Structures are given as C-alpha cells and as structure tokens.
Amino acid sequence: MRKLLTSPVDMPLSEIENLIYQNALNHATELSLNLMAVKVDHRPDDFLGWCGELLKLCKNDLNLDLLEPHQLPLLKKFQTTLETGFSICQFKMARIAPWSVFTGFAEQQTAIHALEERFKLLSYISELRSTPLADMLEEDRLAFAGKHTAKHDHSVYNFDIEWFASTKGAKVFHILLQSQPNDFDAALAHIPLDGDVTQAQYQAFVTAYSKIFTSYTESKSAGEKAPLAPATRLLAMRRPDQFIALTNAKIDILCQGLSIAKFNGFNFNAYWQDMIGTLRTFAWWNSAQPTDEAELNLWNARAVLIDLFIYADESLAQGSNYLKLRDKTLKNKGRAGSGSVARKRSKESAEMLVDRALAADDIPEYLLGKRDSIINGVKDGKSVEHVIGLMRAIFG
C-alpha cells in the first residue's frame, strides 16, 4: 500500500492532478493504519488507474468495521477526491479523443451509466420534441423537464426521467412551467430543431426564459433569479447534440474537467461561452454525422452525453427512479387492502397510457376490444401493466 500511495510521485502529473494527489494524501494520512492493512496486488503507472485502484480498494477491501466514527467523514472526503481525479483524467482524454475513441469509451460505459435506459428516455423525448409543452400531458411535460413522479407509469415510462439532470428541486421553475407552458414554448422556439445553434439564437432563448422569472419576481415581490440548471435541461432535451444538461452539483466537476473557470447557477453567459464553447473544440463533437445507426444515436446526443466522463460506479444505474418505482409497484401487487391509496388519473392521461400500451406488437385482438375497461382501471390508479395483466388472466 505504501508503494501505491507514493507512486504518483513518479508520474507526469498536470498541475490540477498534482493538487488532487496532495489533497488525497492529506486525507489518507488519517486513514493510514487502516489502508496499510489492505492487500495491494495492482499498482497502476498512470494517475487515472491510480485513482481507480484506490477507489476499488476503499469500497471493496477496506475493513469499515475497524474505522473510528470520526474517520468515516475522512474516508468520504478521500473517496470524493479520488473520484474527482478519476473524472478529470477522463476529461483530459475527452479533450483530444477522436470520434472512434469516444464511441469505444461510450460502449465501455454502457452498464455503469445505464446507457440503454438513457437512450430510451432520449427516444421518448424525440417523439415529443415537435409538440409544444402546453399541449403535452402533464407526465410528458415533466419527462421533458426532468422531474420523475409516482404518476409516471413504469410500463410506459420505462426509464428514469431524471437522467442527465433532475429538476425536482427547482420549485419555482415547476410552478411556472405548469402555469405558463406557453411562455416556455416561446423561449424554446428560438432554438432550431436541426443545425448548429448560434449564439444569437441561444441569447434569444435566455432573454425569453429570464423574462418568465422576472415577471414572477415582480408579482411576488421576491428575489427569484432565472435558474440556469433547469434551462439547460430544457435545452438539452430539445437539442441533445448541442447542449449539456446541468445540475448545480455537476457544475464544479464539469468546469474542472473542461479546464474552465467555475461559474454559478445563474451565469448563462459562462455556460455558453466557456462550457459549450469548449465542448465545440473537441474532435469527437465536430465529427461528421455517421451512417451507422448505433453511432448515429450517440452522435445525436453527443453533447448531453458528456457526463459519461464523470466518475460513476454500479450504484448509479441501480439508483434509477424507474427501477425503484417498478420494483415498488411489483412488490405492492396484491396489497389492495393494505391501506395504500391509488393515485387517480385524468381521462386524457389514462387514454394516452392505454393507447400506447395497446400499440405494442404482442397485444392480442381481444384486448383491443377491452380498451374502455382498461382505461377505467387506469383512471382508478392502477398501472397499465397491472390492468392488462388481469385482462390476460381472465380472457386470455
């Protein structure tokens, strides 16, 4: 372990990598006795591998039972520092990687970053993109905006709506989105559905978007500024090839990874000039449109997928809201008398969910004739999957 901890001394570290290494050593000092008890079989000769190996050892081999209570926060800081180092090294690769390297890297990240589920979300959103927010069902509008709720039937929304960037904490944003969807449509209309987005088009969006919050602030005598993160979610869902979806928590690591000055969650200019401007210098982002279908899916989402370079482990995919809702629903099947209250759905919402389910290729003819009965069951709060399952059991 001692050789592993000191091995970066012989590596050609950049200034930021050396700073991360020194921070990691400071945290490791308080954990030295525990770390020395861990058997080390692999000593990478690069900083990316070094961060990854220490993270693996801390998560899998360190005996947590031997840690004192005051050491647990130190271990967390140590791991966070290593995760930052890991991410920055991957972004270093991203800055020079050609398209072929980017596609290979994305393939390696498929399981860890739940790419299959992410592409289901993007595919669903692509079908909504030409529909105004004001004309969408509430569930679809929230799917576009990044807020997963229990009303999102897992048999229809078979993905976590909050991939890329959750907006569930943006309360004022969602109040305004619900009450003034036409104003958000007017803002998004400045962003074309194809071709490169220009600074003038982006600035027109920002002006219109900010005005929504300014009007709200004036009417409420509040100090609410237009938040950047929810805006980037809307932009990234409209044009995932052009925009990066942010959360306030992601800004710091993305700024470090892209080697740009950190900005706050209200700086629309820095987002465009520094973050999007830097992204547009990358070789893989500037690559020609591929003809291969799988690569085309990546290319069409290449900006929003930049968070593949942020460190993640298997817990990221396992934390999917879709999986949690699906498993909870399956667990609660047959517990109608347990005291749980089903969520009622509007007729419009129920019809939409049922019609999408009945459009599947494996739906038998007799179920199509039961459409009204299925809709009534869904209106009462049952999932489409559950109602159709009952129909199959009774009439199949």
Image (spheres, helix red, strand yellow):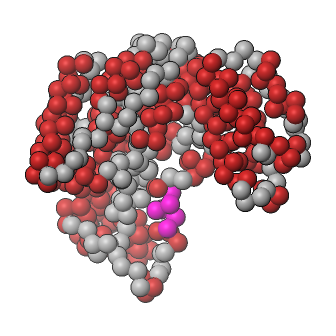
93 sits left or right of 385 in the view:
right
With respect to residue 186, does 367 lie above or below? below
* Nearer to me, 203 or 328: 203
* Quadrant in which the C terminus is drawn: bottom left
List x then y, in percent, for residue 45.
Answer: 79, 22
List x then y, in percent, for residue 318.
Answer: 57, 52
Residue at 29% of width from left, 61% of height from top? Answer: 354
236 sits left or right of 322 in the view:
left
Residue at 72% of width from left, 14% of height from top? Answer: 12
Q: Is residue 2 magenta?
A: no
Residue at 70% of width from left, 35% of height from top? Answer: 24
> What span is colored magenta in the figure?
323-328
Label tally: 0
Q: Is residue 296 visible?
A: no
* Nearer to me, 197 or 50: 50
List x then y, in percent, for residue 147.
Answer: 35, 52
192 sits left or right of 244 in the view:
left
Q: Is residue 326 magenta?
A: yes
Q: Quadrant of residue 240?
A: top left
* Nearer to me, 21 or 157: 21
Residue at 29% of width from left, 25% of height from top? Answer: 269
